[in-house]
Amino acid sequence: MAIATHDSRIVGKERFVRATPVAELPAPVAMTGVIGWVRASLFAGPLNTILTVLTVLLLIWLVPPIIDFLFVHAVWTGADREACLPTAEHPEVGACWAFVRDRFSYFIYGSYPIPERWRVDIFFAMLAVGIFWLLWLEAPRHDLGALYFFVVVPIVSYILLTGWPLIGLRAVDTSLWGGVLVTIVVSWVGIVFSLPIGILLALGRRSNMPAVKLFSVIFIEFVRGVPLITVLFMASVMLPLFVPDAYSPDKLLRALIGIAMFASAYMAEVVRAGLQAIPKGQYEGAMAVGLGYWQMMYLIVLPQALKITIPNIVNTYIGLFKDTTLVVIVGIFDFLRTVEVSRIDPKWAAPTTSATGYVFAAIFYFIFCYGMSRYAKSVEARLGKADRR
Amino acid sequence: MSQAAEAAPASNSALAVEIVGMHKWYGEFHVLKDINLAVERRERIVICGPSGSGKSTMIRCINRLEEHQQGRIIVDGTELTGDLKKIDEVRREVGMVFQHFNLFPHLTIMENCTLAPIWVRKMPKKEAEDKAMHFLTKVKIPEQAHKYPGQLSGGQQQRVAIARALCMQPKIMLFDEPTSALDPEMVKEVLDTMVQLAQDGMTMLVVTHEMGFARQVANRVIFMDAGQIVEMNEPNEFFSHPQHERTKVFLSQILH
């Protein structure tokens, strides 16, 4: 090619000094652009090509029926099961969205008294503001945001949701709570408490103090060693046996404590992995400039350890979010339970009601979990960029 | 072997560092054996010896990155014991520079330098930044203040590490093989910085194999082998007339 000018060839024992620098050339077309991508990703070899073809066939086989079910044959309006029954004109009935629309507020609020539901709406709004504030990385005053999210929101929403007759908020028993409200409350409590408690447990497990270390190890291993369902059963069935009824905490609260403990134990192990990845030199550097233990952890070790554990932390959060459905075991009406109850309601008994309910539940969980996953990805990319700087 | 240490009373705070009959074990392994050393203020000591001879361990005992099991270590009049307060006190007055820099990669150069003054000395941020700028100028990299350690060359990072230690205005500086991890062309810039520091009168204990540096700035050179101080002398004598057999062998191996 053109670059092969005489001064870049060395023949035999000929001496060589480069007189002019070699110009940079664009990469060959076959390596870049759409064609390059297709060649490299879809048709790189015989196996790759076969897999591409098979995948395309699979999609052709699967996607149209799904679209038919969800949209084309779907029933969008209706007052009861009649709307979703197959008839002579419509022998094929897809998703019964009318059912979801009818029961939508039950899915969101459960049996929360209808005149009081604005309180739940305010709770959702407050939570959304807090989440947005903390997750939006350029937002001003993250310290205030954290204070708001971890102190103001819990107190205000506790008063708001359970009620406080003194200021005119009717008391609402937690047995009436349900649906998305419960799912969000349970996972939020799990998420908010598991990280700080998990960090403390992880530090405790690596501590030089035998008592602290022993306590952390026993707590982590014990809680991790039993299934979440057992923890929930213990919290809801066994606790009342030991504690007199009057002092026994609320059923939902007991489940919340169980979930928070469970999530903390898992989080502790995730954080510990991150702590172990920090080189000894960082600890020594921090100690040598005179930082104390907590300063060293807060300023030097944890920022780096948590950064590398973000994928695992989010993974734990996603697992936790889905695990919250297990509270149905102890009789709490979370979102999935409200779907379950509604789909067997005779008022909406139709061939596709159950499927529609489950699809709706799947979409709900998917949006939240995928949202968490994408957010974590963007944070990672951002922090990764900071590393390359 | 050790002459000065025996004579001086243990609490003599005219000495910067005083080590008396110090022993250290790693499990069953006896790493440091009967170390006696008295370092006067403004004195510069270079410590050399084969790898595994305990020289790094010894200077790491001076700011308690390593614990000693027997004997006494008195730094700037404060004896190092299990007392955490005392340890913090000593670490505030003793700066350390490591072989692998140990800068904090998630903080900018400026933040690396101001962190300890702000959090440990409770200095106002503005003052800490002025001070950091002063020392960064001194090590000749003020223009890098807002970059991250990963963006700097090894030599620059090590100079930042020196500036970071200086920002705490230590009375004593420890250097643990500061040039061993550097590319050859960067060794000089770090050594120049250290020479300048020596000329400013800093008390320095330097573990290094840079014999040129030792000749130029050291008041005393210590040779360690198998966890003991084998020979200690002023540099000219040390290099021209080594006494101990081990010292002769070692010097013949590193000075070609």
Image (spheres, coloured by chain):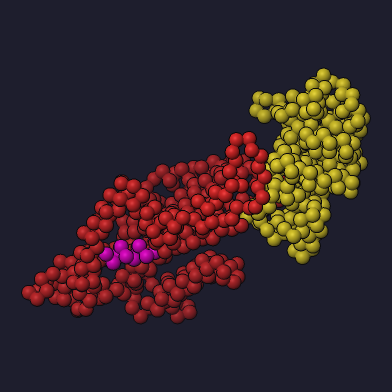
Chain colours: A red, B yellow
Decide which of A195, A379 is in the foreground and name it: A379
Decide which of A208, A160 is in the foreground and name it: A208
Q: Main secondary structure of the magenta part?
A: helix
Q: Is residue A66 above or below residue B140?
A: below
Looking at this view, name the residue that lies furthest to the left.
Answer: A88
Numbered disc total: 0
Q: Is residue A167 left or right of residue B234?
A: left
Q: Residue at x 59, y 55 (%)?
A: A23
Q: Residue at x 31, y 70 (%)?
A: A107
Residue A361 drawn in magenta: yes
The spot of residue B221 in percent (x, y) is: 85, 32
Q: Is residue A117 above or below residue B241?
A: below
The spot of residue B74 in percent (x, y) is: 83, 38
Q: Residue at x 86, y 47 (%)?
A: B196
Q: Which residues are magenta?
A: A359-369
Decide which of A8, A280 is in the foreground and name it: A8
The spot of residue A44 in percent (x, y) is: 36, 49
Q: Is residue A98 above or below residue B7?
A: below
Q: Residue at x 89, y 46 (%)?
A: B199
Q: Is any part of residue A290 visible from this angle? A: no
Residue B119 drawn in magenta: no
Q: Is residue B195 left or right of residue A180?
A: right
- Residue B184 image-quadrant placement: top right
- Residue A187 image-quadrant placement: bottom left
The spot of residue A74 in percent (x, y) is: 20, 72
Q: Is any part of residue A128 visible from this angle? A: yes
Looking at this view, name the residue that lies furthest to the top.
Answer: B245
Decide which of A167, B194 is in the foreground and name it: B194
Split into 4 quadrants, where in the image is the C terminus of chain A? bottom right
Q: Is residue B106 left or right of residue B179?
A: left
Q: Is residue B96 above or below residue A141?
A: above
